[in-house]
Image (cartoon, rainbow, N blue to C red):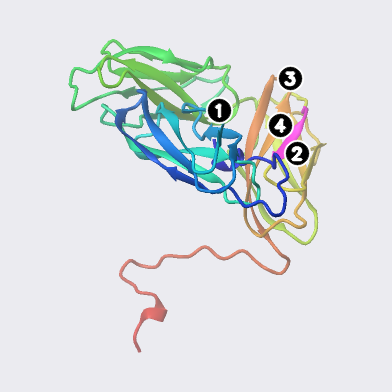
Amino acid sequence: MLLTSLVPAVLAVASAAAPAPQLSVQSCQFGEVFVFSTAQCEIEVKNLGQQKVRIGRILASQPTDTIEPSSLTLAPGETAKLKAVIRPDVAVGLTNRMFLLDTGDSKSVPTYAYAQGFIGSVLDDPRPTVDLGEVIIGGVLPSRQIELTSRDHGSLRATGIVESPAFVDARLENDGRTVRVAYKASAPWGQRSDDRIVVSLDTPQQKKVAIALSAHIVGDVAPERQAVSLGVVRTDADREYFVPLRSRSGKPFRVGKVELEAWKGAKTDVVDCSPAADGCKRIRIRGGKGIGFGPLEGILRVDLPDYDQVLPIRLTATALPPGVEPAEEPTEGPADQAPTANRSA
């Protein structure tokens, strides 16, 4: 969860004469722990001001972490200790776990506290991942395998699959080290990058490991490419841009709600292809006026009620004012040829 999403709306309107809260925060160290274990440490907070300070919300930035108490009030000069509990499940290495101390003062810089430490793994690959590439629903569904190894624990064994999405088939092979995974035909369409399975281990230091999964799931209805480029979007006026969708089976299909994320002011609707054809629709995007120039990315979410799917489509573009053309891609000459500007006469 991004910490920027934790910054609150103004909870109260302070008088113009009231000073901003003055908090001293001492971060804590939780030492060295392994993935999927629990650590804790105490963060010290002191009110350096002359007025009482109310911390209405104390929030962890990571969904697996907690902090207590969740709110408190400090008298002038008073010190309190916050109990931070760290439960790492993916991150490894040196880490800073952030916590927001929300005083409700929108005019002051947000106050953060930190719990610092090192997160280790018994595995040779501390961040195991499996990329299944393109998975075409209706065809042969590919599977991939990954072997879990440890130089420190040569007898390491995986003992079970303890967490898996319903649309993923995950199983252990007989050797006790190899995990085989595949997406099922029920998998959500589009790019998958946040899926994972969790496997239990028999080592005393680390009882579990998360294996990240990624794939591009292609259903009956799909755009021509995984990421659709709209080319150059001009910022002086709203113009129309189109994203074609086609059915691989050629059957007609309905399009429900269409949402476009991260493109301010743009509007969308659904029109026929040109020329019209069965199994072909276009998402029409109208926008561009007033957006900032530079690289532009967005996610188009298309409801396909006939398939009970919401298809995410990644969009890319370059936003430029009129009269400005995109920069040419740099070309590389021979490795032993220096640029002309660097040559001596």
- 331 sits to left or right of 104: left
* Nearest-to-viewer mark from 2 and 4: 4
Say the numbered circle drawn on residue 217. Answer: 1
State the SS at label 4: strand
Give me the C-alpha separation between circle 2 and circle 3.
17 Å
Give me the C-alpha separation between circle 2 and circle 1.
20 Å
State the SS at label 1: strand
Query: Label 3 sits on what residue type?
Result: Asp
Task: Provide residue 140's location: percent of width, then percent of height.
Answer: 50, 19
State the SS at label 2: strand
Q: Residues within 10 Å of mark 3 (few under 14, many from 20)?
A: few
Which badge, 1 or 4, comes first in the chain's sequence?
Answer: 1
> Quarter of the image holding residue 281?
top right
Give me the C-alpha separation between circle 1 and circle 3.
17 Å
Give me the C-alpha separation between circle 2 and circle 4.
9 Å
Which badge, 2 or 3, comes first in the chain's sequence?
Answer: 2
Please identify the quadrant where the C terminus is shown.
bottom left
In the depicted structure, whether residue 88 falls above or below residue 177:
below
Residue 257 drawn in magenta: yes
- Tell me which residue sits at (74%, 29%) in the image: 279
Which segment did they paint magenta?
A: 255-260
Task: Provide residue 117's location: percent of width, then percent of height.
Answer: 33, 37
In front of the other: 267 or 190? 267
Reading the image, the residue beneath label 2 is 283
Give me the C-alpha separation between circle 1 and circle 4.
15 Å
Reading the image, the residue beneath label 4 is 302
> Quarter of the image holding residue 126?
top left
Which badge, 1 or 3, comes first in the chain's sequence?
Answer: 1
* Nearest-to-viewer mark from 1 and 4: 4
